[in-house]
């Protein structure tokens, strides 16, 4: 049996090596490393896949979130609401721009924004909500959009972990990232659509926002050397666009493989009294960026240590709620506002989840987890 990894990018690459290598060398031969035609081609392909009017690539997912906020004309002190249980990037960019991050607790089963808490957090200074589609499934977008509409707020979806997942409206399906005003994603290597380095993108159906976002990613220019906005330099290199163009064709297949692996874990773990399997909400598909269990009445550190001794990696996403992070202590968040995130940070753990997991590997993981907990 091959070594088990959290994410196996080498085996995935080997299967499409010829196609990827050909695209990489074609960029090298062209020497069009920045803003090459393949960047436009990839943006167009992703726009068609998502059914989004505009896709604007950028340097990474954190930049995408920052650029989205920069495009909204917010003033220092304006409030932006997001989840307490997410990767730091989401809150980092709010703070960096001099805006005020307002954190909200999550649901204990889906780990996405608690809508009741969200509504309570809205004030006259609130300007935007950043729902995070954590671990591959959607936050409650119809309710979030309704709250946004009622209070005239922007919605920026953090789709870094959920690219390709779908939301089910009455009779329609819509890709996550295209439901709010702006969607943001990351092409970090381990994401569901990952490149061989850093990359990111923004999506929107709003022409004016798209034009501004495009300009901000390029130093605030529309016409060369005429700067209309304070911008940044955040680009997707042609080499990454070439790699992503190939991998986009396989994204649905990759997400299906993750889902299948998740189903297999679910069946094995659902009867274990020490484990809560990841909930699936009824409103979206779940593409399992992570397979995250909650542990009950057992020592998490000891379990992870045991698995490590059997060469099974396991990770904790995320061990510290955002409201407890040292760098953000001056916002004086109230610990009592976050009972769910506090508990999750002590009980969750994620098992290996990727497109190349074999039944043999999963059986070995499952057996070791269940034997330890029995
Ligand atoms: C990965 C990630 C980001 C940031 O993406 P980078 O490309 O690493 O900057 C933002 N939000 C979430 C939820 C993520 O998982």
Image (cartoon, grey):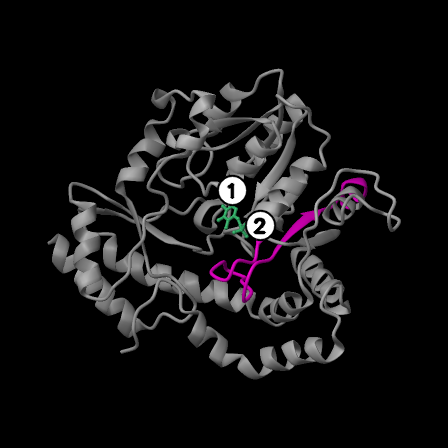
Q: Residues within 10 Å of mark 1 (few under 14, many from 20)?
A: some
Give yes or no for residue 12 being in the magenta stretch: no
Which residue bears the numbered disc 1? 89
**One can see residue 32 in this view:** yes
For the magenta stretch, what is the residue range? 186-210
The image shows residue 217 at horizontal and vertical percentages of 72, 48
Front residue of 245 and 291:
245
Q: Quadrant of the N terminus?
A: bottom left
The image shows residue 278 at horizontal and vertical percentages of 34, 48
Which residue bears the numbered disc 2? 61
Residue 40 appears left or right of 110:
right
Q: Quadrant of the C terminus?
A: bottom left
**Residue behind label 1 places its C-beta within 8 angstroms of ligand 1:** yes
Q: In the rendered view, would you say 26 is above or below 9?
A: below
The image shows residue 255 at horizontal and vertical percentages of 49, 62
Q: Distance of mark 1 from mark 2, alpha carbons?
A: 8 Å
**One can see residue 171 in this view:** no
Disc 2 is placed on an element classified as: helix
Q: Residues within 10 Å of mark 2 (few under 14, many from 20)?
A: many
Mark 1 or 2, nearer chain start: 2
| Residue extending farthest bottom | 18
Label placed on residue 207: none
Q: In the rendered view, would you say 35 is above or below 233?
A: below
């Amino acid at each position: 049996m091959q070594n088990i990894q959290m994410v196996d990018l080498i085996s995935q690459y080997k299967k499409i090596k010829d196609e990827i290598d050909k695209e990489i060398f074609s960029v090298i031969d062209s020497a069009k490393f920045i803003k090459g035609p393949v960047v436009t081609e990839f943006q167009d392909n992703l726009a068609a896949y998502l059914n989004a009017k505009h896709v604007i690539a950028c340097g990474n997912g954190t930049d995408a979130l920052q650029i989205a906020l920069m495009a909204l004309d917010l003033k220092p002190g304006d409030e932006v609401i997001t989840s307490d249980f997410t990767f730091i990037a989401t809150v980092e960019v709010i703070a960096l721009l001099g805006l005020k991050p307002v954190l909200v607790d999550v649901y204990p089963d889906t780990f996405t924004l608690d809508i009741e808490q969200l509504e309570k957090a809205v004030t006259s200074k609130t300007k935007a909500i950043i729902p995070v589609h954590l671990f591959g499934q959607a936050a409650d977008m119809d309710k979030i959009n309704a709250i946004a509409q009622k209070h005239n707020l922007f919605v920026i979806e953090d789709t870094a972990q959920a690219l390709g997942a779908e939301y089910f409206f009455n009779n329609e399906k819509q890709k996550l990232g295209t439901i709010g005003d702006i969607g943001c994603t990351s092409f970090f290597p381990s994401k569901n659509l990952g490149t061989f380095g850093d990359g990111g993108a923004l999506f929107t159906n709003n022409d004016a926002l798209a034009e501004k976002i495009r300009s901000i990613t390029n130093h605030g220019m529309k016409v060369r050397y005429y700067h209309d906005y304070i911008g940044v330099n955040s680009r997707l290199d042609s080499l990454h666009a070439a790699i992503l163009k190939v991998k986009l064709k396989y994204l649905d297949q990759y997400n299906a493989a993750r889902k299948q692996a998740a189903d297999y874990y679910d069946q094995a773990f659902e009867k274990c009294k020490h484990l809560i399997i990841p909930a699936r909400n009824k409103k979206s598909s779940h593409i399992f960026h992570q397979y995250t269990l909650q542990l009950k009445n057992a020592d998490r550190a000891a379990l992870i240590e045991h698995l490590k001794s059997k060469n099974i990696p396991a990770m904790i996403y995320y061990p510290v709620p955002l409201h407890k992070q040292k760098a953000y202590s001056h916002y004086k968040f109230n610990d009592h506002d976050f009972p769910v995130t506090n508990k999750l940070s002590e009980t969750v753990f994620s098992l290996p989840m990727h497109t190349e997991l074999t039944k043999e590997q999963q059986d070995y993981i499952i057996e070791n987890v269940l034997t330890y907990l029995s």
